Every structure is written in C-alpha cells, then in structure tokens.
Image (spheres, helix red, strand yellow):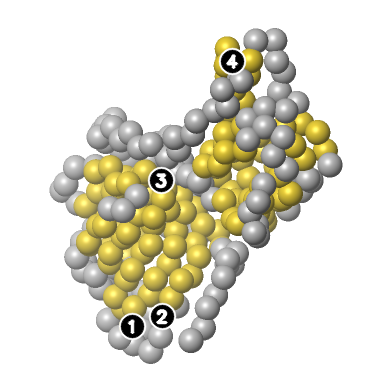
Amino acid sequence: MDIDRPPFARTVASDAWTTGPAWIESVVPPGPSPSTQIDSVTFAPGARTRWHRHDGEQVLVVTAGVGLVQCEGGPVEAIRTGDRVRIKPGEWHWHGAGTTTSMTHLAIEQLPHEGDCAELGEPVELSGEVAPVSRVIVLDQELPDDLAVRRVEVRRITIEPNGVAGAHVHNGPVFGSIETGSVKYQAGDDDEPRILQPGDVFYEPARDRISHFDAQEQGVTFLAYFPLASGQEATLDML
C-alpha cells in the first residue's frame, strides 16, 4: 500500500482548454488502455473550459465551491460540493467555476484507448443566461462575548508566488476565504501545516499564533474579514 500526502504537484491548465486561471492535480494517472484517469481541477472565479467532448464517459464530482456545467442543448446548471455529473461519451459540454465563486472537482474519465482523445470546440458564451442562485454556509463561528462588534473591515490581500507572511498574531478575530492560488497554513494547535485552496475558509481567534501563511508557486489572493469593536483598529504583530 502507498500513501501520498499533500501538498501534491499542480500544473496550470492550458490556455487552449480553459478561459481564466485553472489548475490540475493528477490523482490517478492513466495506465495501459483501456484505463481510468482521475484529475482534481480547480477553477478560479469566472474560469471555465471550452466546449469539448470525450470519446469515453466522464464523471465530475464537486469537492469544493460552486460551479457551472452545461451540456449541448441543455440549460446552464449550478453544481456545488457533493454533486456528481455524468457526461456521456461524445456529448458536447463545458464546466467551470461560477462567475463569483471558485470550484474544485474530480474529473474521472474512462479512456477506451491510449490517450485522452478529446475534441475542443468554441469558447463558452453565456449570453446573459443566469444560473440558479446557490447559498451555501461554509463556516458558522461564534465570537467571544467580550467583543462588541460595531463594524467589519474586509480586505482583499495578495501574496506573491512563494511569498512568506511570517509568524504573526492579530489583535482581533479574523475570518478568511481563499479566492485564487493556494497557501500553506498553520494556526494555533494545528499538528502540521495544511494547504488552503480556492473556496477554503479559515477562522483565527484573537491572539492565535499563525505559524505559517506561505503562498505557493502561483501566489494567493484571499478576502480577510476583521470584526472590530468601537474605535478598534485591526493590527498584526510579527513574532
């Protein structure tokens, strides 16, 4: 038995296949034909594939976030964590993130012969079509009783590729949501760092030690929410 532990190698999806930033992580590489190939694909908000079709059947399993999918002749459908999409051999389709949300899915593909003989079509034009609204609670966190919240400051923060924030603490609680890229993250009593990717959220209690917030090779952009008491300013102290 072999056990592989994260972080795993990720590659940037080809511009020929996608519109907008997307990353591919091989989970099960193809073997001797016929075989099955499994990839984990992450789409930044607004990113999606072109229209395309495969020789074999493909199954998409959404593992994080909210995205969109459409098969030829059908409506644009919203898909979210836990949803499974079965695409028939030769069926024209596209899939990707929502317009304002990221999405990660497993792409499980049956390869009837050697190589993925996929046929590419035109870029996707949504033409004003509106997908169903999706509202998903990704974090429900109580705050300390002594924090009289009067306002919330929201910052969009970007760390360049391989940039290291360094060990630090905040003077108040912080909520975060990864938009693009990924970061090695370790906070409080975490046994070991973990990789946060688009769609992941985190919560840091006030004065909790953040040991690692290290951008990976594609950098990271995230939203940080600072609940503040009257007259309080959000501060960061390096350790």
Foreground residue, 93 or 82? 82
Q: Amino acid at mark 2?
A: Pro
**Among the two numbered marks 1 and 4 on one chain, the one whose residue lies closer to the N terminus:** 1
**From the viewer's perspective, is 90 left or right of 116?**
left
Residue 66 in which image quadrant: top left
Residue type pointed to by label 3: Gly
User: What's under tag 1, amino acid-wise?
Assistant: Ser
Mark 1 Cα-neighbour bin, 10 Å: few <14, some 14–19, many ≥20: some
Label 1 to label 3, Cα distance in Å?
A: 28 Å
Image coordinates for residue 31, horizontal then vertical, percent: 40, 85
Q: Position of residue 137 (x, y in %)?
A: 38, 36
Of the numbered discs in the image, which one, if any, rests on residue 30? 2
Which residue lies at the image location 26% right of the left edge and 57% below the top edge?
84
On residue 35, which mark appears? Answer: 1
- Going by the numbered disc 4, the residue's amino acid type is Ala
Q: Which mark is residue 65?
A: 3
Disc 3 from disc 2: Cα separation: 26 Å
Q: CA distance from mark 1 to mark 2?
A: 6 Å
**Distance between mark 4 and mark 3 Cα atoms:** 31 Å
User: Is label 1 in contact with label 2 (beta carbons under 8 Å)?
Assistant: yes
Relative to residue 232, is residue 100 depicted above or below?
A: below
Question: Which mark, residue 148?
Answer: 4
In terms of sequence position, does the residue under pointer 3 or pointer 2 come before the other? 2
